[in-house]
Amino acid sequence: MNNSTLNFISLESSTNSTTDSIGLKSLDICLYSINMLFGLPAHFYIIWLIFTGTKNGVASEFFILNMSVCELGCSLNSLFCILIIFIQFSHLTTLTNFLRGLVITGSPLFHCLICVERYLAVVHPVTFLKFKPLRYRVICCTVAWIITLGSCLCCIFTVDHRYIYVWFFSLQYLLFFFIQLFCLVAVLRALKQSGPGERGREKEVENHMKKRAFRIILITIVTMVVIYVPFTIVGFSVIVTQHNIMALFYFALACNMLGCFVQPVHYLNHAGKCWFIS
């Protein structure tokens, strides 16, 4: 649940009227409350399912496990942002700035690891089997958490420097978007090709599996566009126009939050635990 305030609100609200400020705070509370109330239980449930072995165990779901832990931090950040709005507790501001690193770098990075894993499994299956053991996933996630920690520290020191901060998250979103897009397009191209010796019943089963894979990957691509493109547009519009467009920011924030609900809902549905879909 990528819920970074990105410091846009504080930059603009100081020049707004009292009525506008109250309206912005109400909208903030609404968005953060939705993210917290749905994000926290969803990701706690996913972590519980993985550890209790409802699906395929910790090893095969290790990237999703780490991503859910990261998203829990993002959801907790929503709670802290609500507390800041109500009680003006300055010490929490540093904590929320730190947790923005999970939003800007952590969650997209674990999405990238999942996409690279899918890419290797379909396009380079021999390499995928070689690096399938849990120890390689642990190494990848350790490196990802180190990078995320560095991003969290950078957010603390750059959040007050408007354009450095905007470049910081915009370029990262753009990089993560193109990495995932490359992996998913490569997977789609590979799935279009017929395997050797496919005939009759085997071909029908294979086509069914390919169609299902197509649907999943296309959903992922659409989700990526919804999550990354609006905020990237917001970031570069701030750089070009040198002022914030609040309507565009809140649209991007809403898209970002809604897009990040897709992964947990898809996981729970695949595990047969999403009662409101079934």
Image (spheres, rainbow, N blue to C red):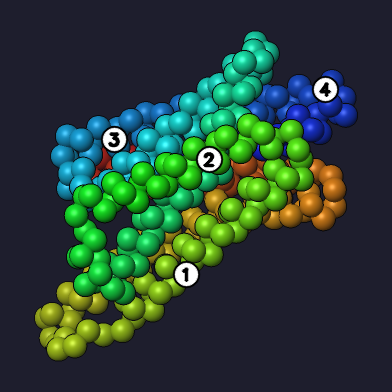
* Whether residue 25 is situated above or below residue 173 in the rendered picture: above
Residue at left offset 23%, top offset 39%: 50
Q: Say which element carries label 2.
A: helix
Residue at left offset 53%, top offset 64%: 178
**Upstream in the sequence, badge 3 or badge 1?**
3
What residue is pinned by disc 2?
150
Q: Quadrant of residue 38?
A: top left
The amino acid pointed to by label 2 is Gly
Of the pair 242 and 194, the residue shown nearer to us: 242
What residue is pinned by disc 4?
19
* Whether residue 121 is situated above or below residue 133 in the rendered picture: below
The mark closer to the camera, 3 or 2, is 2
Characterize the local packing of mark 4: few (<14), some (14-19) or many (20 or more) Cα atoms within 10 angstroms. Answer: few
Of the pair 241 and 205, the residue shown nearer to us: 241
**Upstream in the sequence, badge 2 or badge 1?**
2
In the rendered picture of this protein, how many numbered marks are placed on residues? 4
Asked if residue 126 lies left or right of residue 75, the reply is left
What residue is pinned by disc 3?
47
